[in-house]
Image (cartoon, grey):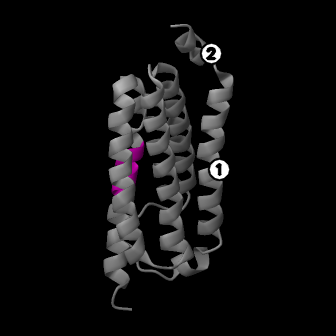
Protein backbone atom coordinates (compact mmCIF):
# COMPACT_ATOMS: atom_id res chain seq x y z
CA UNK A 1 0.00 0.00 0.00
CA UNK A 2 2.90 2.37 0.69
CA UNK A 3 4.09 2.10 -2.92
CA UNK A 4 0.64 3.05 -4.20
CA UNK A 5 0.61 6.12 -1.93
CA UNK A 6 4.09 7.06 -3.16
CA UNK A 7 2.92 6.83 -6.80
CA UNK A 8 -0.21 8.85 -6.00
CA UNK A 9 1.85 11.98 -5.38
CA UNK A 10 4.42 11.46 -8.10
CA UNK A 11 4.85 14.75 -9.90
CA UNK A 12 7.84 13.18 -11.64
CA UNK A 13 5.57 10.55 -13.21
CA UNK A 14 3.22 13.28 -14.44
CA UNK A 15 6.18 15.20 -15.88
CA UNK A 16 7.42 12.07 -17.69
CA UNK A 17 3.93 11.43 -19.12
CA UNK A 18 3.70 15.00 -20.41
CA UNK A 19 7.26 14.91 -21.76
CA UNK A 20 6.60 11.67 -23.67
CA UNK A 21 3.33 12.91 -25.13
CA UNK A 22 4.63 16.31 -26.14
CA UNK A 23 7.83 14.84 -27.56
CA UNK A 24 5.66 12.67 -29.83
CA UNK A 25 3.59 15.72 -30.72
CA UNK A 26 6.68 17.83 -31.47
CA UNK A 27 8.22 15.15 -33.69
CA UNK A 28 4.95 14.62 -35.54
CA UNK A 29 4.34 18.36 -35.95
CA UNK A 30 7.85 18.85 -37.31
CA UNK A 31 7.33 16.13 -39.91
CA UNK A 32 3.88 17.40 -40.87
CA UNK A 33 4.83 21.08 -41.05
CA UNK A 34 7.80 20.42 -43.28
CA UNK A 35 5.50 18.64 -45.75
CA UNK A 36 2.53 21.03 -45.87
CA UNK A 37 3.32 22.09 -49.45
CA UNK A 38 2.92 18.47 -50.57
CA UNK A 39 -0.22 18.01 -48.45
CA UNK A 40 -1.79 21.11 -50.03
CA UNK A 41 -1.58 19.44 -53.46
CA UNK A 42 -3.69 16.46 -52.38
CA UNK A 43 -7.38 16.04 -52.96
CA UNK A 44 -9.05 15.58 -49.58
CA UNK A 45 -12.47 14.34 -48.48
CA UNK A 46 -15.13 17.06 -48.28
CA UNK A 47 -15.40 16.55 -44.52
CA UNK A 48 -11.74 17.39 -43.86
CA UNK A 49 -11.63 20.00 -41.08
CA UNK A 50 -9.83 23.30 -41.60
CA UNK A 51 -6.09 23.14 -40.88
CA UNK A 52 -6.46 25.28 -37.74
CA UNK A 53 -8.47 22.48 -36.06
CA UNK A 54 -5.67 19.90 -36.06
CA UNK A 55 -3.18 21.52 -33.63
CA UNK A 56 -5.99 22.42 -31.21
CA UNK A 57 -7.40 18.90 -31.21
CA UNK A 58 -4.00 17.21 -31.01
CA UNK A 59 -2.82 19.40 -28.15
CA UNK A 60 -5.99 18.62 -26.21
CA UNK A 61 -5.62 14.90 -26.94
CA UNK A 62 -1.98 14.81 -25.85
CA UNK A 63 -2.93 16.50 -22.56
CA UNK A 64 -5.65 13.88 -22.01
CA UNK A 65 -3.23 11.09 -22.95
CA UNK A 66 -0.61 12.31 -20.47
CA UNK A 67 -3.19 12.52 -17.69
CA UNK A 68 -4.45 9.05 -18.63
CA UNK A 69 -0.94 7.58 -18.45
CA UNK A 70 -0.29 9.27 -15.10
CA UNK A 71 -3.65 8.11 -13.72
CA UNK A 72 -2.94 4.57 -14.87
CA UNK A 73 0.54 4.66 -13.29
CA UNK A 74 -0.88 5.83 -9.96
CA UNK A 75 -3.53 3.12 -9.85
CA UNK A 76 -1.82 0.07 -11.31
CA UNK A 77 -1.29 -2.27 -8.37
CA UNK A 78 1.42 -4.53 -9.76
CA UNK A 79 4.71 -3.97 -11.50
CA UNK A 80 3.61 -6.32 -14.27
CA UNK A 81 0.47 -4.33 -15.01
CA UNK A 82 2.40 -1.04 -14.90
CA UNK A 83 5.01 -2.45 -17.29
CA UNK A 84 2.34 -3.73 -19.69
CA UNK A 85 0.52 -0.40 -19.65
CA UNK A 86 3.68 1.62 -20.19
CA UNK A 87 4.76 -0.63 -23.07
CA UNK A 88 1.41 -0.32 -24.86
CA UNK A 89 1.22 3.40 -24.19
CA UNK A 90 4.73 3.85 -25.58
CA UNK A 91 3.96 1.68 -28.59
CA UNK A 92 0.90 3.68 -29.51
CA UNK A 93 2.93 6.91 -29.19
CA UNK A 94 5.56 5.44 -31.53
CA UNK A 95 2.88 4.33 -33.99
CA UNK A 96 1.39 7.82 -33.87
CA UNK A 97 4.74 9.29 -34.94
CA UNK A 98 5.20 6.46 -37.47
CA UNK A 99 1.86 7.37 -39.06
CA UNK A 100 2.98 10.99 -39.46
CA UNK A 101 6.22 9.80 -41.04
CA UNK A 102 4.43 7.35 -43.37
CA UNK A 103 1.77 9.83 -44.49
CA UNK A 104 3.64 13.14 -44.49
CA UNK A 105 7.31 12.20 -44.43
CA UNK A 106 7.16 9.54 -47.11
CA UNK A 107 4.23 11.15 -48.96
CA UNK A 108 2.48 7.78 -48.86
CA UNK A 109 -1.18 7.94 -47.79
CA UNK A 110 -1.43 4.18 -48.48
CA UNK A 111 1.31 3.43 -45.94
CA UNK A 112 -0.52 5.83 -43.65
CA UNK A 113 -3.70 3.73 -43.87
CA UNK A 114 -1.81 0.58 -42.85
CA UNK A 115 0.03 2.36 -40.03
CA UNK A 116 -3.08 4.02 -38.64
CA UNK A 117 -4.87 0.67 -38.49
CA UNK A 118 -2.05 -0.68 -36.31
CA UNK A 119 -2.26 2.52 -34.27
CA UNK A 120 -5.98 1.99 -33.67
CA UNK A 121 -5.34 -1.56 -32.50
CA UNK A 122 -2.62 -0.34 -30.12
CA UNK A 123 -4.95 2.35 -28.74
CA UNK A 124 -7.70 -0.21 -28.08
CA UNK A 125 -5.24 -2.51 -26.30
CA UNK A 126 -3.92 0.43 -24.26
CA UNK A 127 -7.48 1.35 -23.26
CA UNK A 128 -8.16 -2.24 -22.17
CA UNK A 129 -4.92 -2.43 -20.16
CA UNK A 130 -5.49 0.98 -18.57
CA UNK A 131 -9.02 -0.08 -17.62
CA UNK A 132 -7.58 -2.89 -15.48
CA UNK A 133 -6.14 -0.22 -13.18
CA UNK A 134 -8.44 2.77 -13.64
CA UNK A 135 -11.68 3.34 -15.50
CA UNK A 136 -10.84 7.06 -15.55
CA UNK A 137 -7.51 6.40 -17.26
CA UNK A 138 -9.17 4.28 -19.93
CA UNK A 139 -11.98 6.80 -20.53
CA UNK A 140 -9.46 9.61 -20.96
CA UNK A 141 -8.17 7.75 -24.04
CA UNK A 142 -11.59 7.42 -25.70
CA UNK A 143 -11.48 10.87 -27.38
CA UNK A 144 -8.06 9.92 -28.78
CA UNK A 145 -9.46 6.67 -30.18
CA UNK A 146 -12.42 8.53 -31.72
CA UNK A 147 -10.20 11.20 -33.30
CA UNK A 148 -7.76 8.63 -34.69
CA UNK A 149 -10.74 6.70 -36.09
CA UNK A 150 -11.85 9.91 -37.82
CA UNK A 151 -8.27 10.50 -38.98
CA UNK A 152 -8.19 6.96 -40.40
CA UNK A 153 -11.30 7.78 -42.42
CA UNK A 154 -9.68 11.00 -43.66
CA UNK A 155 -6.48 9.11 -44.48
CA UNK A 156 -8.35 6.41 -46.40
CA UNK A 157 -10.40 9.01 -48.26
CA UNK A 158 -7.29 10.96 -49.17
CA UNK A 159 -5.62 7.79 -50.37
CA UNK A 160 -8.59 6.85 -52.56
CA UNK A 161 -8.95 10.36 -53.99
CA UNK A 162 -5.28 10.50 -54.93
CA UNK A 163 -4.51 6.89 -55.87
CA UNK A 164 -5.04 7.56 -59.56
CA UNK A 165 -2.68 10.53 -59.70
Residue 9 image label: 2
> Is residue 42 found left or right of 14 in the rendered image?
left
List the single residue furthest toward the top. 1
Residue drawn at x 41%, y 38% as measured from the top left: 141
Secondary structure under badge 2?
Answer: loop
The residue positioned 48% from the left and 35% from the top of the image is 83
Q: Which residues are magenta?
A: 144-150
Query: Does 115 appear above or below 134?
Result: below
Give percent across and percent down for residue 68. Answer: 48, 32
Nearest the viewer among 81 and 149 is 81
Report x, y in % for residue 15.
67, 32
* Residue 111 within the magenta-colored segment of the rendering: no
Front-most of residues 129 and 61: 129
Residue drawn at x 41%, y 74% is 111
| Residue 132 on image: x %, y % | 34, 26
Mark 1, secondary structure of its residue: helix
Task: State which quadrant residue 150 falls in.
Answer: bottom left
Q: Which mark is residue 23?
A: 1
Q: Is residue 41 above or below residue 80?
A: below
Q: Quadrant of the C terminus?
A: bottom left
Is 146 within the magenta? yes
Badge count? 2
| Residue furthest to the bottom | 165
Q: Residue at x 65, y 55 (%)?
A: 26
> Which of the marked residues, 1 or 2, is nearer the chain's N terminus?
2
**Label 1 to label 2: alpha-carbon separation:** 23 Å
Q: Does residue 46 appear in this view?
A: no
Image coords of residue 42 (percent x, y): 46, 80
Amino acid sequence: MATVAKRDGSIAALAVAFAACFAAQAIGASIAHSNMDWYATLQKPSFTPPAVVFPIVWTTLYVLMAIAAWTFWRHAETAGLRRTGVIWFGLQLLLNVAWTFAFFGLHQPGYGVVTILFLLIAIVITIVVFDRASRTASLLLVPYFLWVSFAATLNAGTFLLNSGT
